[in-house]
């Protein structure tokens, strides 16, 4: 499993806020994903109805997951494929390694896979003398930089064009060092040229799966680059890696989910490539692998299924909650410390990693509700975050500063007259010190706010005072 730094969330946040290049890179999220999703959803009249249908499909599937997983295995095997069950990351890695060794694999091309990140498959293959090669452009960039993805659909969203050029020149040393990489098309062309031979030479192709269709034993990948198809059709062995909640009952169900997935993720009606893979190559097929394997991972999801957070398993990994989250937009994905960032990660990570490791993440939300508002399968993310907060409190995992602050505040809040008097007096003093500027660059006990933004001075009477006047 990838080493987690979720317990260091607060220090991670400070580093992210102070990183000027990261702050510059994060601006593209609002101007790109958010605006495009709005246009795409408004263009489709039945979009809200489709979200209801998508929610119901996933809810039904979760309630009968064991049945559909068994049907899926039967249909994969009927088509000549193999299904492997992994209870945890150790078992998943061992299964993948054994398949690669049986194929005498020296290199493995990879499509984008969050489950691959979750189990740390790249590092494991390298230790066992097999070279993993990321073929998604974003994943390729962060592999060269030695980083984890910072977004579940745009892994390199935190990287600027200049940083990509620097990584390419540092790695692609057989090319002219003075070549121009100013234009994004130059970067794309260079990456394509470097990867072309890798696709052909690879012994095994490893992809993720957006969906597993029980009815047909099919795995589905949704991409905007041709790398996914090349990864699973050119090598002699294709391994699809997925977690148990990716199962969907029928082809018709998948078509509904696909209609909300791309619109929510990238603002497209459909992604450039939506590829259905069913079993190994047949005699009449022009291409495809000789072997087709599906590795299905649990890794704590059964516990979620049986508990208070089963609704999180509806997630179809569109990234919309990340794109619209003010916290994610301020600190990026790496601050969350593990594979899954943003609101979905703040709910999922404690469930998979444990609350002791990830107790800070449920606090990483304003509870503004925007994540639930845009979720294509209507996961009640704010409610789930509050449930985790309740458990943090019940298990006494809150840090001493927060405990002290709450006790101090409670002492006054339990005495309304004293509270109102002190608040009114404080507001007057604070407003006076602000002077004509009308704001503070620093203020005692609020450096967490004022280190990165101005604090507006109070203006006029307090809310309680106005309420009292208007209700005499």
Image: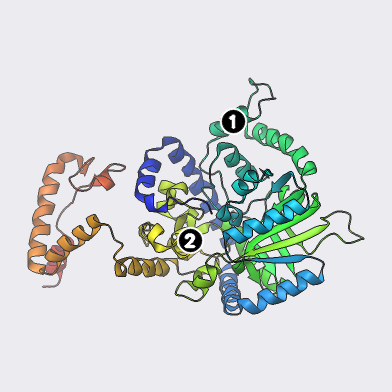
Looking at the picture, does residue 191 appear above or below residue 277? Answer: above
The answer to whether residue 269 is left or right of residue 401 is right
Q: Nearer the viewer, residue 294 or 199?
A: 294
| Residue name at image x 45 percent, y 63 percent | 347
The picture quadrant where one finds residue 91 is bottom right
The answer to whether residue 384 is left or right of residue 213 is left
Provide the secondary structure element on which disc 2 rests: helix
- Sequence-earlier tag: 2 or 1: 1
Tell me the quarter of the image containing the N terminus.
bottom right
| Residue name at image x 42 percent, y 69 percent | 384
Residue 248 at x, y percent in the picture: 66, 71
Mark 2 and mark 1: span between their CA atoms? Answer: 31 Å
| Residue name at image x 63 percent, y 20 percent | 178
The residue sitting at the top extreme is 178
**Disc number for residue 441:** none
The picture quadrant where one finds residue 222 is bottom right
The picture quadrant where one finds residue 405 is bottom left
| Residue name at image x 17 percent, y 63 percent | 407
Tell me the quarter of the image containing the C terminus.
bottom left
Badge 1 is on which residue? 165
**Disc number for residue 344:** 2
Task: Estimate how packed mark 2 is, as few (under 14), some (14 to 19) or many (20 or more) residues with alpha carbons within 10 Å.
Answer: many
Residue 453 at x, y percent in the picture: 30, 43
């Amino acid at each position: 499993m990838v080493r987690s730094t979720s317990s260091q969330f607060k220090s991670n946040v400070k580093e992210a806020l102070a990183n000027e290049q990261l702050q510059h890179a994060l601006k593209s999220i609002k101007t790109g994903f958010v605006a495009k999703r709005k246009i795409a959803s408004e263009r489709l009249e039945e979009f809200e109805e489709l979200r209801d249908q998508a929610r119901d499909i996933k809810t039904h599937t979760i309630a009968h997951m064991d049945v559909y997983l068994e049907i899926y295995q039967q249909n994969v095997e009927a088509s000549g494929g193999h299904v492997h069950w992994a209870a945890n990351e150790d078992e998943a890695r061992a299964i993948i390694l054994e398949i690669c060794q049986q194929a005498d694999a020296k290199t493995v091309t990879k499509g984008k896979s969050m489950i691959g990140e979750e189990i740390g498959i790249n590092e494991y293959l390298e230790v066992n003398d097999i070279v993993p090669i990321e073929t998604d452009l974003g994943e390729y960039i962060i592999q060269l930089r030695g980083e984890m993805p910072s977004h579940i659909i745009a892994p390199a969203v935190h990287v600027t064009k200049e940083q990509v050029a620097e990584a390419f020149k540092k790695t692609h040393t057989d090319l002219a060092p003075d070549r121009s990489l100013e234009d994004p098309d130059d970067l794309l062309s260079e990456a394509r040229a470097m990867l072309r031979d890798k696709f052909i030479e690879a012994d095994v192709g490893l992809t993720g799966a957006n969906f597993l269709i029980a009815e047909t034993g099919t795995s589905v990948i949704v991409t905007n680059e041709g790398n996914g198809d090349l990864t699973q059709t050119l090598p002699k062995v294709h391994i699809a890696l997925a977690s148990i909640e990716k199962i969907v009952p029928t082809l018709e169900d998948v078509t509904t989910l696909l209609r909300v997935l791309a619109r929510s993720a990238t603002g497209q009606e459909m992604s450039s490539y939506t590829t259905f893979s069913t079993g190994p190559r047949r005699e009449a097929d022009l291409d495809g692998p000789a072997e087709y394997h599906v590795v299905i991972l649990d890794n704590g999801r059964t516990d979620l299924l049986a508990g208070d957070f089963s609704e999180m398993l509806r997630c179809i990994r569109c990234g919309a909650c990340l794109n619209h989250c003010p916290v994610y937009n301020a600190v990026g994905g790496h601050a969350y410390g593990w594979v899954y960032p943003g609101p979905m990660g703040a709910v999922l990570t404690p469930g998979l990693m444990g609350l002791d490791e990830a107790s800070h993440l449920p606090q990483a939300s304003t509870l503004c509700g925007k994540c639930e508002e845009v979720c294509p399968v209507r996961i009640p993310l704010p409610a789930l975050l509050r449930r985790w907060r309740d458990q943090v409190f019940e298990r006494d995992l809150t840090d001493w500063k927060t405990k002290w602050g709450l006790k101090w505040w409670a002492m006054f809040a339990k005495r309304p007259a004293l509270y109102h008097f002190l608040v009114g007096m404080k507001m007057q003093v604070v407003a006076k010190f602000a002077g004509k500027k009308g704001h503070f660059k620093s203020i005692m006990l609020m450096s967490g706010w004022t280190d990165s933004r101005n604090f507006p001075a109070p203006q006029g009477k307090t809310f309680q005072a106005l309420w009292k006047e208007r209700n005499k």
